Amino acid sequence: MGDRLKGRVAVVTGAGRGIGRAEAILLAEEGAKVVVNDLGGGPDGVGESSSPADEVVQEIQKMGGEAVANYDSVTTTEGGERIIKTAIDRFGRLDILVNNAGILRDRMVYNMSPEEWDIVMKVHLYGHFNCAKPACAIFRQQRSGRIINTASESGLGNMGQANYSAAKEGIVGFTRTVARDMGRYGVTCNAIRPRAATRLTVTEELRQAMERARASGVAMPTEAGLDLTKLDPEAIAPIVVYLATDEAANINGCTFLVMAGQIAIYSEPIPMKTIIKDGQWTLDDLSKLMPSTLAAGLINPSPPQPQK
């Protein structure tokens, strides 16, 4: 047990499995008292179970830490408020919020239903807001606090994930603005894009193969040429816990790529090229200039394919 977070109280949403579980356990190992929130649903958000959150609480208690389970859904204002209230009611304060809860409803955009769009937005984007708002009210009063949000590389564009991509990249913008809203009160807000093998990113068959590979010490490549033995969810937790410490007080509004053995900080988007003229651009102007200026060298990431 460490003491970097001794006396602090943390909330982790979606903490019953995968990345959230690892975050909750490492926070507890560093001395934080933890609210382990998990609805206990499936990867698609269907169903409920208290077991995932309860099991993580038991793990933390067995190692000498303090934790309490919460089973509320992050998709509603009331659920978010109850999650944060659990920390106050049980431990008397709140210092850290890790927004991690997530689901998938993958579908090509032309087949995606409004319901599949809405539920992913509710869990990810609304879920971050629903917990951050009541947490920020507390943080503002006490003039301290740490928020770590969970974005995704899919936010940069990923086939069949229009809902997930939009929600995750929305979280990046949300993070930047919360950092500016709350920084004056001694609060930081950062985001991670984790690269890990979880029930949302690999099938059960692939997970079992990963376990066999870990046991035998054999590297198991993915289609991207990555070693699955290096994609353990536990590898994500250290940077999250670091961002929750006093040592990270000057890190605010940043987004990090995180995987085992690699952490990268993303640059903020800036204009790459600019064309300027006095007055307004006309369509004739753009037809003449775009191919040799702003559009020069651009590559279509998904060019048209021959009809099958």
Image (cartoon, helix red, strand yellow):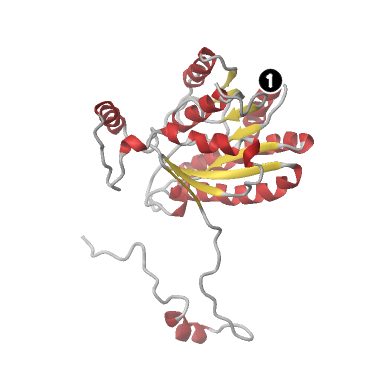
Q: Which residue is outermost to the left? A: 308
Q: Position of residue 170 (x, y in %)?
A: 55, 50
Against 144, is 288 above or below? below
Q: Quarter of the image containing the N terminus?
A: top right
| Total numbered badges shown on the rendered structure | 1
- Residue at coordinates 54% horizontally, 23% vertically from top-left? 29
Give left or right: position of 240 versus 106: right
Residue 115 in view (yes/no)? yes
Q: Nearer the viewer, residue 242 or 205?
A: 242
Which quadrant holds residue 217? top left
Give left or right: position of 235 versus 226: right
Residue 38 in view (yes/no)? no
Q: Name the residue tied to disc 1.
A: 91
Q: Quarter of the image containing the C terminus?
A: bottom left
Q: Position of residue 191 (x, y in %)?
A: 55, 44
The kind of residue on which mark 1 rests is Phe
Give left or right: position of 188 versus 266: right
Against 164, is 9 above or below? above
Against 123, is 87 above or below? above
- Residue at coordinates 66% horizontally, 42% vertically from top-left? 249
- Dot 1: what SS? helix
- Residue at coordinates 46% horizontally, 25% vertically from top-left? 47
- Residue at coordinates 75% horizontally, 43% vertically from top-left? 185
Which quadrant holds residue 131? top right
